[in-house]
Image (cartoon, coloured by chain):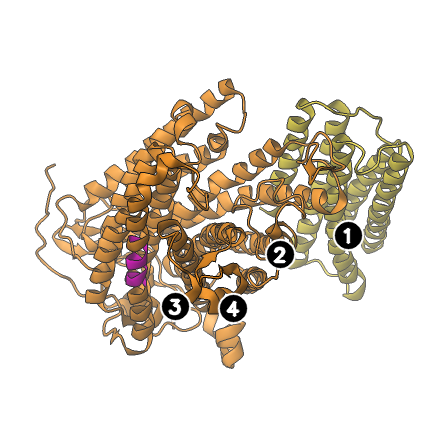
Amino acid sequence: MGMASITMMFAAFTSAYIVRQAAGNWLEFELPALFFVSTGVILLSSASLHGSYTAFKKGREKLYKGLMVLTFLLGLAFVVLQYQGWQALAASGVELTTNPSGSFVYVISGIHAAHVLGGIAALVVALIHAFALPFRFSAARKLRFELTATYWHFVDLLWLYLLFFFLFQ
Amino acid sequence: MANVATPVTTTPKYDEDLLIEEYGYDDHFHEHHEGDKYQANFITTYIFSQDHKIIAKQFLITGMFWAIVGALMSLVFRLQLGFPEESLAWLKPVLGKWIVVNDAGVGTLAPEFYYALVTMHGTILVFFVLTAGLSGTFSNLLIPLQIGARDMASPFLNMLSYWFFFLASVVMFFSLFLNTGPFAGGWTAYPPLSALPQASSGSGAGMTLWVVSLVFFVVSVLLGGINYITTVLNLRTKGMSMWRMPLTIWSFFITAIIGLLSFPVLVSAFFLVVFDRELNTSFFLNEIFINNQALDYAGGSPVLYQHLFWFFGHPEVYIIILPAMGMVSEVLSVHSRKPIFGYKAMVFSILAIAFLSFIVWAHHMFMSGVNPFISNFFVVFTLIIAVPSAVKVFNWIATLYGGNIRFNAASLFGIGFVSMFISGGLTGIFLGNSAIDIQLHDTYFVVAHFHIVMGVAAFFGMFAGIYNWFPKMYGRFMNDTLGKIHFWGTLVGAYAVFWPMHYLGMAGVPRRYYSFDNFETFSHFAGLNQFITIAAIVTFGFQILFVINFFYSIWYGKKMTTRNPWGASTLEWTTPIKTGHGNWPGKVPTVQRWAYDYGKDGKEYIPQIVPAQEGETNVH
């Protein structure tokens, strides 16, 4: 349900983008290459979190913990890459206030990054669970993990949608 | 109709405890909550409470506080509109510098503050009273009680939901006392007044606090909504299928879904406004000159804000009216001793209204320069809303028809709701036509329309709910005679205030204007404006009567002696008079039938906990 809300928020942003674009005075520019690297990173992180979840269900403790740490690092890397992408964008002459087309990219990717940070916070909790508690498979812990993973895949897919949106609009 | 006035032969007595003991199921709730850690002391019981019944009361009383503040504001600006020549110097002790006293000792309301009052009146009534005060109160009170749940799915989030609302209230209240005044650009906060801090005196700090307050408010609505939906989906007791739920629960459920889908869009719009304000982006701002100075904005579109705002704003009016509709359905059915007419049609019309509410937003923008061809779609969808609305009105009237109606304050307000909804709904058909809107947009016709259909009507639904469920909340009754006086005063008063506004609007008198001195055409409306102002003051007097009745009855009202005073079939009346934490002292009741078995098989009513009897016809 939270995801339905977030979806609506980004649907609002992207439709605002379309409406604003149709109104003219719209600067076309290339997305920074770093955004494609970050896309690869967040896709990998989804894959590794899924691997970790499978390992958790099969009871392979080492793999489960290792892949979760990897996911966490990839998530952090994504946020850093997005930030560097912004810097590259600014360096190419598209700053926040240059033109609405650029402003939209900053605002939308920024708010997406904020949601990824929320996912990272959930991962931190999951990591604490993984390392501080003795390894045990229970329905409650499975549900907790599932919720974290669902959210993580959701922000990943959301980024894919936004990237394709920026590319093809 | 063949089954009009089914003769009632017996008024049965039911032993709820025995029924729950026999058919209920044991969830071991009280074993886990021994000693009631949630209600250990004063603070956890009444302040940071996680009990849904207390949270409902918190929402209600905060909402009432805001309703009084908002209504007083409207009286002040009505005084200005009705009696522009009279001195308002006597308000100086309260309003201070906003009353400008000239050398002759005549005090006038400062125009900036007039706009601020109009803005705050709208914001407060729409968000704090009719959203939080209405659905916040009754969703919290009734969802767990009527579906047979111990409490909300997450009592903690529920508590947070109230406290975010409280925080929003504090911030908004604080903004009233700013040196530059609260935000004054209208409750819709259109740019550029909202996006340029230097645009007007309220656009600076006033707007900053306004937007901060509303973001807290949205957090509150989302936390509440997630909770309501989860509770309805997951915590229904055994036997309570979706099609057995009372219409109240259906309406709260759909309301929460609409809120969850529309409020985030409002937040998106606010984000972009804040970027325009603080970081000089140009989402909503085009080339603008202030005091002959060109500002550094280019290419933005204020109409874009309107799209985003009304994509939220139209569903918002259904967030306000649907809970009222649900409660009125319940109240009318209980007090006319008849099952609700067309239960499934009622549910499907709620769903249809909810769906349509998302595709009609541009009817608020016919005159904003949107393409007239696109307007046609919005006209069509807008007028289609009349269909489910008419279905509901027909069903309410059919429920009343031939019923054994008890005319008490609750049912009168229910019937008054139907009256208001019809009057206000019909003018909606005028306004939904883009061609007629050329004359009527932004006039007092619009003011009359929305005040009747979602302001007064929603208040009537709320009053019906308060009079009906007051015994459940406080174990005492409100004084019914005072309630009836309150009803007749409010009904006549509200029509006296808003009916004449239609004529003002048809003549083209624009809303939101501080003074009509420069418009010779409108000078003959001065008398009508005085009449409206006097009617508003009198109507407000009747609300004071209600407030006195409310607080007096909490402590000194007639005590409840039986647990089901209205003879209602729903689950909330199977709980003990003093309903403790967990709602039922022993087992949770199970549901054996739908919520509307009134006047059936010669029995006056059959509670939902009574299993199907031998030879019983038509068990839902």
Between the residue at mark 1 and the residue at mark 4, the CA separation in whole angstroms equals 29 Å
B328 left or right, relative to B125: left
The chain carrying label 2 is B
- Magenta span of residues: B535-543
Label whose residue precedes the other's in the sequence (3 or 4): 4
Three-letter residue code for mark 3: Lys
Of tags 4 and 2, which is closer to the observer?
A: 2
Of label 4 and label 2, which has the lower sequence position? 4
Report crowding for label 1: few under 14, some 14 to 19, many 20 or more residues within 10 A (C-alpha). many
Which residue is pictured at 68% across the width and 41% down the height? Answer: B272
| Residue ID for mark 4 | B50
Note whether A110 is above or below B54 in the view shown: above
Mark drawn on residue A120: 1
On the image, numbered disc 3 is attached to which residue? Answer: B587
Question: What residue sits 35% from the left and 42% below the top?
Answer: B448
Find out whether residue B387 is within the magenta segment. no
Is residue B538 rendered magenta in the image?
yes
The chain letter under disc 1 is: A
> In the structure shown, which secondary structural element does the residue marked by tag 2 occupy?
helix
Query: Residue B487: image x %, image y %?
Result: 24, 57
Q: Quadrant of the C terminus of chain A?
A: top right
Q: Nearer the viewer, mark 3 or mark 2?
A: 2
Residue situated in front as seen by the camera: B549 or B474: B549
Label 2 – label 1 distance at C-alpha: 30 Å
